Image (cartoon, rainbow, N blue to C red):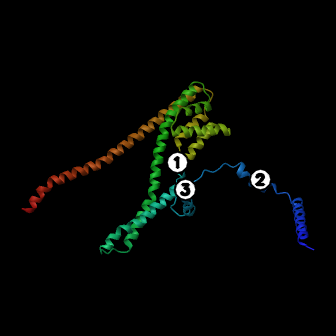
Amino acid sequence: MNLLPVVLTGGAVGGGVALLVRELMRPQPALAPALARSAPAVLAMPEPELDRDERWGRWLLARLERVPGVRIPVKNLALTGQGPGQFMLKKTALAALGLFCPMIATAPWIIAGVSLPFYVPHVVGLVVALLLFMTPDLAVRDQAKRAREEFAHALSAYLDLVALKRAADAGPAEALEKAAAIGRGWPFLYLQGALRRARLEKIPPYQALRELAAEYDLPVLDDVADIMRGSATDGAAVYKALRARTAALNAELLAEQASEANAASEKMTAPGALLAVLVMLLMAFPAVIRMITI
């Protein structure tokens, strides 16, 4: 008698019964882990994909952020639209370049047979690496300074627009939003985003402006938030306060431009004086040579 069909049939039936019992006896899954697994796919907003430079830079930042002297200007980077990862990657790349440049520069001298102390390339490399490591900080600081100046100029026009809207009996929030909607530059886009967020989150517009000023270190925007916070129903009073702040802001901007122009003029005097000295030396050189050779 062939027992193979009987064994296969019994095995199939037994396996089916075991699967049925397993399904019937399976415990209910815990609700919290199930929601935790399903929440990222349904509720969480997808994070923006980072490029390769930003990923490498953040990897370096995670390992160098505790090193003394390593500081990330977060507000300046946010204002200029740069990522902290790319900033750290640039600093590290420049520092590595500074370390190797003196060694490469001394290679021709060594080939030519000119002996240099072994510590000279290393000391010079460390100094150059330190200077290049600080270069991105200075560049970002200058870019952020120019961006804040540009924002201050745009805010001067924005204050005039808000004052006109308030003079036309518009409410504080309405005046801020309509005035911000007129401009197309990046300062007006920042203002539009902050006011839109205030409307969606049901918070006062002056609070959104104050948060925007704190996020990007824009102290000139705090005055606007203070004026709109203390705005009453009388549009004329707010109109006068806004126009007075506009006049004061314009005076500050003109004073800063005048000081920058004076500083630039003083810097130009040094090259002019050096050029005059060189011309005098060239004119006196033949006479001095003739007196020496006689």
Q: Image height check: is 225 above or below 2?
A: above
Disc 2 element? helix
Q: Is 189 on the left or on the right of 40, as rendered?
A: left
Residue under label 2, please give it.
35
Residue under label 3, please give it.
54
The quadrant in which residue 105 appears is: bottom left
x and y percentages locating residue 221 in the rendered image: 54, 40
Looking at the rendered image, the quarter that the N terminus falls into is bottom right
The quadrant in which residue 130 appears is: bottom left
The quadrant in which residue 264 appears is: top left
Residue sitting at 89 percent across and 70 percent down? 7
Disc 3 element? helix
Residue sitting at 46 percent across and 46 percent down? 145
Q: Nearer the viewer, mark 2 or mark 1?
A: 2
- Work out whether mark 3 precedes mark 1 in sequence or the reverse, and give the earlier one: 3
Disc 1 element? loop
Q: Label 3 is placed on what type of residue?
A: Glu
